Each structure stands twice: as C-alpha cells, then as structure tokens.
Amino acid sequence: MKMTRLRKAVTWSLQIILAMVFLAVGMAKISGVQSTVDLFQEIGVGQWLRYVVGMVEVGSAVLLLFGPYASLGAGFLMILMAGASMTHLWLVGGSIVPALALGLTAGAVLYLRRQIQRADEIEVIHEHQTRKSA
C-alpha cells in the first residue's frame, strides 16, 4: 500500500503550520512578552512554568520539522494543549477553542505521521520479500 503524495503533503503542511505557531508562542513565553507573564501570574504557580511551557513548545516545534521525530513533537503538544484547555476552563477563563484546535491538529499530525511510518515499513518489507523471491 503506497501512501499518497497528497496525504504526505497535507501532513507536512500541518506540521509546518503547527511548528510556526508553537515556535512563535513558545518564544513569546520564553522572552517574557507581558501578556504571557500576566497569564502565568494569574495561573498562580510561578513564572518557572512559563519557561517550561515555552521550552516544550519550541522543542516540539523543532521536532515537528524532522519527520522521524514529528510524532513525538505532536504528542508533546497534545498533552500541553490538554493542560492549556483545562487551565482555561478551571483557572483563568477565556476560550478553550484555540487550545482545542491546536491539540486536535497535533493529534491529526500524530495519526497521519504514524500512518506514513507504517506504510513506509510495509513498503520496505514488501520490497525485501520481492527481492528474496526473485
């Protein structure tokens, strides 16, 4: 079963979009943009969490740009966005729609990346069996 070029293109497009978004918001947190400082002040845990979240966002964005590691980056972002959704619901208010949308997009990348990986593995096994029988 060959993975279609369209599916791979869609997956890469989603990965690049997510990477750009999380690189931007992660750097905003790390650099101390006032709105992020205020948000984490409202959460009440301390500014250390802002740095941790920012580093996870930037690190995950980088992972998304390297095919073999994109699933790992997407998984981290899904967990992070679940936490962001809960934080907005229970602590700070505001809309959870952005966090849910980003989390679901990360989930789609994770799913599609795993499908691509499996299809590539099956193709390698099939080629190996074909060479063996020839």
Image: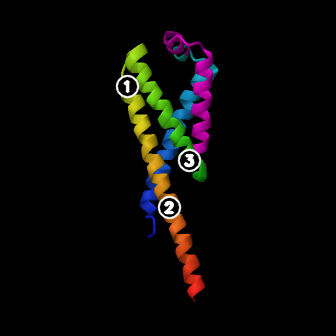
Q: Which residue is located at x 55 percent, y 77 percent?
A: 127
- Mark 3 or mark 1: name the one nearer the start of the chain: 3
For mark 2, does the 10 Å Cα neighbourhood hold few (<14), some (14 to 19), or many (20 or more) residues?
Answer: some
Element type at mark 3: helix
The disc placed on residue 118 is: 2
Spot the residue most to the bottom: 134
Element type at mark 1: loop
Report the Cα–Cα distance between label 3 and label 2: 14 Å
Three-letter amino acid code of the residue under disc 3: Ala
Q: Which residue is located at x 41 percent, y 26 percent?
A: 85
Query: Could you tell me which quadrant the N terminus lies in?
Result: bottom left
Q: Position of residue 115 (x, y in %)?
A: 46, 57
The disc placed on residue 70 is: 3
The disc placed on residue 96 is: 1
- Mark 1 or mark 2: name the one nearer the start of the chain: 1
Report the Cα–Cα distance between label 1 and label 2: 33 Å
The boundaries of the magenta stretch are 37-66
Report the Cα–Cα distance between label 3 and label 1: 24 Å
Q: Position of residue 75 (x, y in %)?
A: 51, 41
Q: Position of residue 2 (x, y in %)?
A: 45, 69
